[in-house]
Image (tube, rainbow, N blue to C red):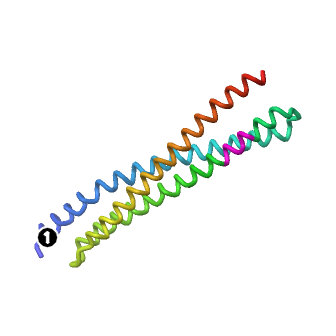
Amino acid sequence: MDSLTVITDLSHIIELSVAPVFLLAAIAGFLGVMSGRLGRIVDRSRILKLQQSSSNQTEKEAVSQDEVKVLWKRMAIINYAIGFCTTAGLLISLLIISLFLSSFWSQGISSLILTLFIFAMISLVIALILFLKEVQLTTRTMRILKSQFKNLS
């Protein structure tokens, strides 16, 4: 086999794999954003726990209990979003591997590549929807807390 042909074939395989690699980088960035949100939820729940142990005011405790419930719901939603986003990343990684392997195997695995891409996109769409739901829940909660704190003062 001519070395120029091998190099040309390899460069074509790498070209095919570049787009999924960029998608993988975007997913990694998105995972970073969601992990940051999860960290903020955990930090806020710790602050509320400290406030509850040092507080004797019943109304403020009721407000913080409601907020803790919302925080647990947000945590569950963001955990699912992280799970689906990680799944999308894993599927994209398998897709990249499959693209490389397909050029070396004589059998076509185009249906596997298509299936991996479709499931990766479905996982990413679900992760984005869950992320949006968590952001909307946060916004709604902040509006409620704002009105409750106005009533307490």
Please tell me whether residue 69 belongs to the stretch shown in magenta.
yes
Q: Which of the two residues, 50 or 13, is positioned nearer the viewer here?
A: 50
Residue 110: % across, % down: 26, 69
Which residue is painted at 85% across and 41% down in the image? 53
Residue ID at (62%, 49%): 75
Amino acid carrying mark 1 in the image = Ser
91 in relation to 81, above or below: below
Residue in view at x 49 percent, y 50 percent: 31
On the image, the x and y values in percent for residue 91 come to 40, 63
Callout 1 secondary element: helix
Is 55 in front, or is 139? Answer: 139
Looking at the rendered image, the quarter that the C terminus falls into is: top right
Q: Does 114 sit above or below residue 22? A: below
Question: In the rendered view, does 143 fall on the left or right side of 11?
Answer: right
> Which residue occupies the extreme bottom position in the image?
106
Query: What's the magenta region?
Result: 66-72
Q: Which sits in the foreground, 34 or 135?
A: 135
For the stretch drawn in magenta, what is the main secondary structure? helix
Is 17 situated left or right of 40 in this image?
Answer: left
Query: Residue beneath label 1, please?
Result: 3
Q: Position of residue 43 (x, y in %)?
A: 68, 42
Residue 109 in which image quadrant:
bottom left
Taking the spot 48% from the left edge, 51% from the top edge, the residue there is 127
